[in-house]
Image (cartoon, grey):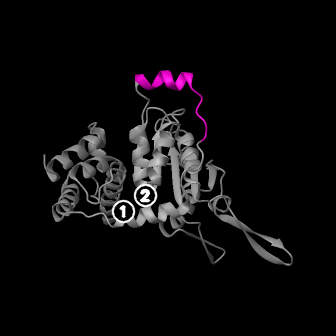
């Protein structure tokens, strides 16, 4: 399976980050976008470039800054041959890296909303279809807040998964310091991802698993520590990501472990604590673990 070859190629590029790679690929096979969060120097940009190279997909990078305008992302019209002609922006790629997305203003961030949801851009009243497949990989630094604009709920909800990249474990450091990774050669092509998406949609989910997803959504809506619960889009993203993990494991059905593995990347960025909970030092991850313990079987 081509996606497994992509996984192997990324494993030889980004050392000691197997869980990160698996989560990215599970989201990609499900047709979702990914938000990478981690400190500088952990390989977020390298991962995006490497995925595009190994997948044989076109790659575009947008460096988000406070002075970036929406037209710099989507494209603009220029006067040529006595008529206006649309010049596509860097958003017209199959893999688009939105680097440091939270450094752009909310107006520019919102330029991605239509593209991420509908795989199209409307510019000057004309709709332009984006390439297929289309994947946005956004990055943000979790500790720097000066000169940044937090992503609004509507924007962050468009990401199927939020992948938190931590420092590699000790056993990976020797390889990191002694080897120079090379960009992988293409081991897949665009058609493989269309086939994978069909395969993911065919993965079976038992009624008991669906009931567990519904239970967690209800528990989240009733939890006094949260401002609101999980939206239907969030619940569908959780299921889609679990299906992606099942495909990576070579299965045609979702197991409980798939739901558990998919829960944090699919839901952590969709849970918003109340002001009182934040003041009391409550952590979103702890709330999510409590919800999972009640919704899923032990």
Report which quarter residue 130 is drawn in. bottom right
Q: Tags 1 and 2 in contact by the CB under 8 Å rule? A: yes
Report which quarter residue 215 is drawn in. bottom left
Q: Nearer the viewer, residue 100 or 260?
A: 260
Give the side of residue 136 with respect to residue 251, left or right: right
Q: Secondary structure at mark 2?
A: helix
Residue at 56%, 48% (x, y): give it. 54
Residue at 64%, 59% (x, y): give it. 73
Up-down relation of residue 188 to residue 284 (above or below): below
Q: CA distance from mark 1 to mark 2?
A: 7 Å
Q: Residue 29 — which label?
A: 2
Residue span colored magenta = 170-183
Up-down relation of residue 179 to residue 91 (above or below): above
Q: Residue 200 — which label?
A: 1
Q: Taking the image as drawn, is residue 152 in sight?
A: no
The image shows residue 241 at horizontal and vertical percentages of: 35, 56
What's the magenta bit mostly, secondary-structure-wise? Answer: helix
The image shows residue 59 at horizontal and vertical percentages of: 62, 53
Residue at 24%, 48% (x, y): give it. 257
The image shows residue 10 at horizontal and vertical percentages of: 50, 41
Whichever of labels 1 and 2 marks the residue nearer the N terminus, that label is: 2
The image shows residue 145 at horizontal and vertical percentages of: 50, 39
Q: Taking the image as drawn, is residue 92 in sight?
A: yes
Q: Quadrant of the C terminus?
A: top left
């Amino acid at each position: 399976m081509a996606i497994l070859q992509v996984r192997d190629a990324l494993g030889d590029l980004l050392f000691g980050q197997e869980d990160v790679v698996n989560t990215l690929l599970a989201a990609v096979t499900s047709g979702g976008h990914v938000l990478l969060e981690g400190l500088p120097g952990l390989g977020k940009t390298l991962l995006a470039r490497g995925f595009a190279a190994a997948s044989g997909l076109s790659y575009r990078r947008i460096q988000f800054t406070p002075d970036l305008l929406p037209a710099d992302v989507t494209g603009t019209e220029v006067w040529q041959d006595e008529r206006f002609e649309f010049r596509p922006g860097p958003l017209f790629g199959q893999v688009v890296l939105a680097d440091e997305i939270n450094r752009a203003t909310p107006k520019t961030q919102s330029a991605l909303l239509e593209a991420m949801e509908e795989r199209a851009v409307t510019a000057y009243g004309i709709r332009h279809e984006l390439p297929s497949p289309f994947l946005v990989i956004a990055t943000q630094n979790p500790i720097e807040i000066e000169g940044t604009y937090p992503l609004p709920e509507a924007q962050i909800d468009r990401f199927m998964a939020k992948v938190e990249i931590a420092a590699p474990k000790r056993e990976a450091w020797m390889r990191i310091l002694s080897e120079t990774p090379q960009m992988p050669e293409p081991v897949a092509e665009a058609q493989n991802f269309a086939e994978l998406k069909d395969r993911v949609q065919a993965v079976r989910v038992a009624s008991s698993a669906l009931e567990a997803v519904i239970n967690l959504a209800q528990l989240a809506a009733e939890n006094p520590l949260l401002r609101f619960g999980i939206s239907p889009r969030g619940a569908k993203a959780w299921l889609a990501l679990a299906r992606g993990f099942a495909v990576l494991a070579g299965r045609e059905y979702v197991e409980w472990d798939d739901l558990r593995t998919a829960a944090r990347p699919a839901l952590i960025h969709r849970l918003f604590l109340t002001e009182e909970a934040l003041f009391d030092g409550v952590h979103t991850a702890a709330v999510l673990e409590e919800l999972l313990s009640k919704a899923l079987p032990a």
